[in-house]
Image (tube, grey):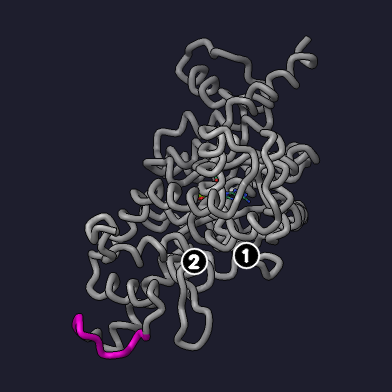
Amino acid sequence: MLARMAPLLVRKRRALAPHFPVGGPVAPEDLVGREPYIRRTASRLEDGEHLLVAGPRRIGKTSVMLEVLRRLRRKGAVTAYVDCLGATDLRGLGERLAASLLTSLEGHEGGLEDARAIAAGMRPHGRIRVEHLELVMPIVREPSAQRAFDAALDLPRSIAARAGRRVVVAFDEFQAAGRLGPRVFDVMRARFQAQRGVAYAFLGSEEGIIHELFSAKGKALYRFAVAHDLAEAGGHRFGIDPSDWQTYLRRKFAQKRMTIGEAEVDRVVDLTGGHPQDTMQLCAALYHFMQDQALRAVTAQLVDAAFEIALRELERPFTLHWSDLGEKKYLQAVAKRIARGEPLYAARPDGDVPRAEVLRAVTALRARGLVVRTGRGRYEYLEPMLAEHVRRLDAVPAIVLGR
Ligand SMILES: Nc1ncnc2c1ncn2[C@@H]1O[C@H](COP(=O)(O)OP(=O)(O)OP(=O)(O)O)[C@@H](O)[C@H]1O
Ligand SMILES: [Mg+2]
C-alpha cells in the first residue's frame, strides 16, 4: 500500500513546489548543472577526504550538499547535516549533530526527542532502537553543556566504529559555530583529527572568514580540509555550464506547454550572469507573466520585461546589502564606481577617495563576495543584477523627466 502511495506523494509534493523554486535548497531535478560536482564531491567524501565548500551567497551550496548526502546514504553511509546558524548554544549544536545522525541511522526523525523523553523517565513518542539509544544517552544526560558538546562530537566516530559504515557530516554556515563559545574550532579540530571512517564537509557563505579559518597559519582548522570550489567548477562562472541552462529551461517551459528558444535562454543568462538564484528568479517572473497573459512563446521583449520585474523583487535584499555598505566609509562610493565601470582611482567631482581607501574598499567588497577581480585593477559585480540595481540608484526615474 505504502509503496503504491509513494509516487503519488512525490508527485503531490512536486505539484506544491513552485515551478521555478527560489529561496531555500532546491530538489535534485531543479539543480541545474551540478551533476559533475555532486559526483566528485560524493566520491571524495566517500573516500574519507574532508572538504571545504565556500562560496558566495545563493549559488546552491546547501542544495548540492543535501543531494550529495542523499546519494551517500543510498550507498550505505550514515550522514548528518547540521546548520550551524540554527544553533543558539554549544549544547544545541551538539544535539543537532546527534539528532541528524540518529535520523540517518533510524530512517525517521524524532530519535533524539525519544532519547530525551526516556532520560526524563517518560514514554517516548516513537520507537528508538536500543543500540542507538545507548549511543546518545551520554549526550542527553550530561549536565555540562561543554561535555555534552564534546560527547556529540565523538558520536560520528563511535558510529563509524560500531556500525562499520562510512559516516559523513556536513556543517553548513560553519563560520557561525564560532559565535557559540570560545575556542569552539579548537575543540572541534582536536576531536575530528583522529576520527577514522568519518569525513567532514564544511560549508560557508562568508567567503573571507571561512577561508581564513582553514588556511591562515595558526588557525584551528589550518589545512584540515581541502577547498573544493563550487563557484568556479569546470571553469564556468558559478560552476554551471550555460548549456545546462539551455536544457533545463527548455524542459521547464515545455512542461507548461510554453517554448523558449536558444537566443532567449542566452539572453536570460546574459542578464543574470548565470547567477543561480537570480536566473531562477528571472525565470519565475517570466513564467508567471506569461501565464497571466496567456502567452506561449518566450520573446526577447518578454525576457526584458521579466528582468525588470525580478529586479524589483530583488530590491529588498539589494537595499539591505547597500545600507550595509553604508556603515563603512567609501564602500558605497567605490561600489558605485565598479558598477558604472568607472576608473577606480581618478579624481572625481563628488569627492576624491584616497588610493589606500580604494584598495581597502575593494578588499572589503571582495571579502563580502560582492565583487570579483577580472584583471589587473579591474573588478566587476558577481551578480550583474546587483550592479544594475546600483547603477540605477542615482538615476532620475523616467517618469520625473516626463518621458
Ligand atoms: N544549480 C542550481 N540550479 C538552479 N537554481 C539554483 C541552483 N543553485 C541555487 N539555485 C537557486 O538558489 C537558491 C538558493 O539555493 P541554496 O540555498 O542551495 O544556495 P546556498 O548557496 O546554500 O545559499 P545561502 O548562501 O543562502 O546559504 C535556490 O532556491 C535556487 O533558486
Ligand atoms: Mg546555504
Residue type of the residue flagged with mark 2: Leu
The magenta region covers 343-351
Q: In this view of the protein, can residue 249 be seen by the observer?
A: yes
Observer-nearest of 84 and 183: 84
Q: Identify the secondary structure beneath mark 1.
A: loop
Which residue position is annotated with label 1?
229
Image point (75%, 21%), residue name:
7
Image point (43%, 38%), residue name:
92
Q: Identify the secondary structure beneath mark 2.
A: loop
Image point (74%, 52%), residue name:
35
Q: Position of residue 242 (x, y in %)?
A: 68, 60
When the figure is inspected, residue 9 is found, relative to residue 294, above or below; the finding is above
Residue type of the residue flagged with mark 1: Asp
When the figure is inspected, residue 129 is found, relative to residue 159, above or below; the finding is above
Q: Main secondary structure of the magenta part?
A: loop
Q: Mark 2 vs mark 1: which is more N-terminal? A: 1
Q: Which mark is residue 382?
A: 2
Quadrant location, the N terminus: top right
Image point (49%, 48%), residue name:
306
Q: Position of residue 215 (x, y in %)?
A: 53, 72
Quadrant location, the C terminus: bottom left
Spatial separation of the CA atoms under disc 2 and disc 1: 15 Å
When the figure is inspected, residue 296 is found, relative to residue 249, above or below; the finding is above
